[in-house]
Amino acid sequence: MQFTAEHVEWGRVDITLDDLGCGRSWEEIHRVRGVELVCPECGGQVFARVSKLGTRHLYHHTRPLSCSLENESLEHHLLKLELVTCARAAGYRAELEVGSPTREWRADVMVFDSDGDRLMALEAQLSPITAGEIAARTGLYERDGVRVCWFGFRPRPWVGTVPTLLVQAPADRGQPWSVSAGLARLPGKSGHWSPVGATLADAVSWMLTGQIVPHTPRSSSRVTDEDEWYEWAEGWTRSWNDSWRMWWTTPSYVTSDAERAQEEAEATRRRQAQEKAAARQRAVKEREKAVKRQAYAAFWDRTGLDQRQWRYFRALADLYFGRSLVFGAPDSRYGDGRPVYERSGPEGEQWTLVGVACPDPCRLRAWAEELSLLVPSHADLDVLAGRAWAPFQVYVFDPDTGAMDQERVLPSPVDAW
């Protein structure tokens, strides 16, 4: 079943038009002897007839071995016929089976603008084809300045990789064809794309007049049905193996999508900046922890104290001074000793530095003249006394004997001199 032919004198014949597109009538070719019509694809002779359903069409007198028009299915022919009818109803000149001058493509339906230039190809694609093949065919149309939309009946791996609409024929004659997938809108500031229902006639009119355009979403690419609890896989394919990446929508939704994509990109940049800042903070804390671990290890190694002795040492200091003291981490500013703080105030929010526990005698500085020095033995006291260049206040809290003592260390006469 096909709808176009060539006549040696009349030229192109399109039986879907009242004048056959060449100023003739159906009666001049239907059951008329001597009228020679040939297939534009294979050159074989074709004749006019009416199907049992009342559809005018052409058929080959002898079935050719290879002819794409002859091999098209009834579904394909009916869809082409509906597409050309929709384009003409929208007020456009539309022709069936129009090929390029180079014969690199042949459009099922070619729609022309008011100047007679090729405007858009409407392609019924029902036979198997790969995504790569249909992308290449789309590229040929784009190269020649022709827009294109591909129409099908059911999800295939290629749907949504090029401008696509899935359509559905009416159950009853006289009812309109409908679009089942490929139209979407972007409601509000939040939420995902949602499908839009329409008649095929409306959708064809919208795309020809520019009221809808094919669009690859820049923000969220999910399409969810508000009436269903589930989410379809990135579109209408209902398969996690396929991806519907492009659909038809209005230019206003394209603008909204761009604005949302920009907001999402800015939010992503802020989140990434926050994550980087947090990572830097974690790295700084890890380095600080590593430094503290090294400082503690050096402290225990230098003083020879273990955890049990240190607990007793602190308890003796608290007991002697009659208040709870806070011992900081080993600090290089205080000769690798541990600064000792007294907390005061209603909630202990004030910390006052009052001493240094177990400083390295070789690293004493001016702070040793102003702060009390806390050591665990009289041997440590003697070492500090040998290093004193000014009076030092030293407290001894021996964790092994429990002895508590204090002494003001004076510099030796030689040091004083």
Image (cartoon, helix red, strand yellow):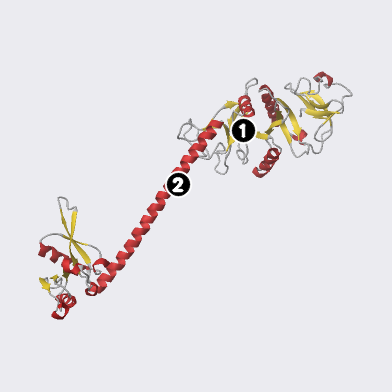
Q: Which mark is residue 269?
A: 2
Using the image as rendered, state which of residue 131 and residue 209 is in the foreground.
209
Badge 1, how many Cα within 10 Å: few under 14, some, many 20+?
Answer: many
Above or below 364: residue 251:
above
Using the image as rendered, state which of residue 247 and residue 265 is in the foreground.
265
Q: Point out residue 88 in the picture as x, y percentages from the top left corner.
A: 69, 23
Judge depth for marks 2 and 1 and give the one in front: 2
Badge 2, how many Cα within 10 Å: few under 14, some, many 20+?
Answer: few
Label 2 to label 1, Cα distance in Å?
A: 35 Å
Q: Is residue 403 visible?
A: no
Across the whole image, how many numbered discs are drawn on residues? Answer: 2
Q: Point out residue 137 in the picture as x, y percentages from the top left corner.
A: 69, 40
* Residue type, label 1: Leu
* Residue type, label 2: Arg
Disc 1 designates what residue?
165
Above or below 212: residue 245:
below
Mark 2 vs 1, N-terminal side? 1
Q: SS class of the residue under badge 2?
A: helix
Quadrant where the image shows the C terminus: bottom left
**Viewed as shown, does residue 12 lie left or right of 109?**
right
Q: Give the image quarter of residue 146.
A: top right
Quadrant where the image shows the N terminus: top right
Q: Is residue 365 visible?
A: yes
Q: Give the image quarter of residue 145.
A: top right
Q: Point out residue 42 in the picture as x, y percentages from the top left corner.
A: 82, 36
Residue drawn at (82%, 18%) of the image: 27
Q: Residue furthest right?
A: 34
Using the image as rendered, state which of residue 294 and residue 311 is in the foreground.
294
